[in-house]
Amino acid sequence: MDPWWIDIIKGFLIINLVLVGFAYTTWAERKLLSRMQGRYGPNRAGPFGLLQPIADLIKLVRKESFFPMSASNKMYIAAPIISTAAALLTFSVIPFGPGWHIWKWDVSGSVVDAPIALILVFALGSLGIYGFIIGGWASDSKYATLGAMRTCAQLVSYEVSLALAVLGVVIQAHSLNLNEIVHQQGEQFWFFGPQFVGMVIFFLAGTAETSRPPFDLPEADTEIVAGYHTEYGGMRWGLFSMAEYVNMITLSGLAVTLFFGGWHGPWDPLGPLWFLIKLAVVVFIFIWMRAALPRLRYDQLMRFGWKVLLPVATLNAFVTALVVVAVK
């Protein structure tokens, strides 16, 4: 076990790296989408637009943060904080390296090495949903409340399929510990092969879970006036946006951990580098899907989740269990 002060240092570094990653994921997304659509993208703030995230932050901090007079004050303010905190905490259990011996201490490759890390990821993800629900309800606006209910229905529905999609990996690895799952992929094979169906379901359900296109119904501004955060502005709105991008980065890190060998690569001491490269590829896939696919209608979204993804995810877990038992 790491000394407590090493855990604090790792936690501080990881949180700040994730925040920087969030900022420049927004820049990368705008650049990639613009190139796919034949545009330039951000190119005014700094060379190649690299200072655009800083300009956006300054704008949001200085922008008026209006407050509905009839809003439930404490809940209204707490909602974006809950969502952002849950999103940032989730990354603490994802292993990003093999661990290192520094001077007289053995430093692990994750902030928290929990035996039930995978359950902790889903628990924190479920906690973050409360921020979206509370934000819509506390605004005391019919538009925001309906948007919050719409968000709740989508996220809860697809969270079931997301959990079942990783059940096959858990059955094969015989563990809920993410470090152990990565370790087994280093000794045998990456799980994206035998769990290809689970991986596809994970990507589709994860896209809906992070409200990414084509499943961005919670913020379909052409339909519902921005949904649960209709009454938010300034940095309060910025925290909700941050939570969604951090959730996408965390989900990408979880996909790398479960299906693509985690930090394993040609030379394991460079584990964090391989993890970062794989993470960037998965984030690129999320951005590519946004550029390539049209938004679904809400009835199509719910029907696809309950009548397609859920049965296939259940069948995949059942078949995996049969194969594991048969092999033994």
Image: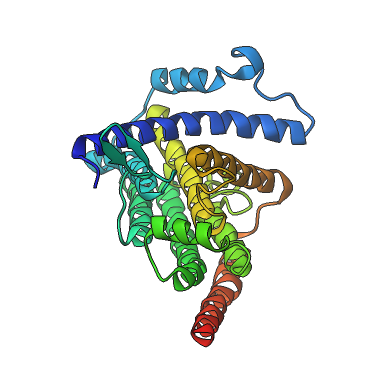
What residue appears at the point 41 percent right and 71 percent down from the top-left corner?
174
Q: From this view, report whether residue 36 is shown above or below residue 98.
A: above
Q: From this view, report whether residue 37 is shown above or below residue 207.
A: above
Instruction: Say which of 29 and 71 sits in front.
Output: 29
Q: Where is residue 42 in the image (x, y as percent from the top left)?
A: 65, 22
The part of the image, by quadrant, that contains residue 14 is top left
Q: Tell how many labels.
A: 0
What residue appears at the point 46 percent right and 55 percent down from the top-left corner?
151
Can see residue 232?
no
Q: From this view, report whether residue 277 is shown above or below residue 156.
A: above
Q: Position of residue 33 (x, y in %)?
A: 69, 35
What residue appears at the point 55 percent right and 58 percent down from the top-left corner?
259
Relative placement, left or right, of 115 versus 186 is left
Relative placement, left or right, of 218 versus 109 is right
Instruction: Say which of 92 and 36 sits in front.
Output: 92
Q: Position of residue 325 (x, y in %)?
A: 49, 85
Instruction: Say which of 252 and 242 sits in front.
Output: 252
Q: Where is residue 280 in the image (x, y as percent from the top left)?
A: 59, 40
Q: From this view, report whether residue 48 is shown above or below residue 324.
A: above
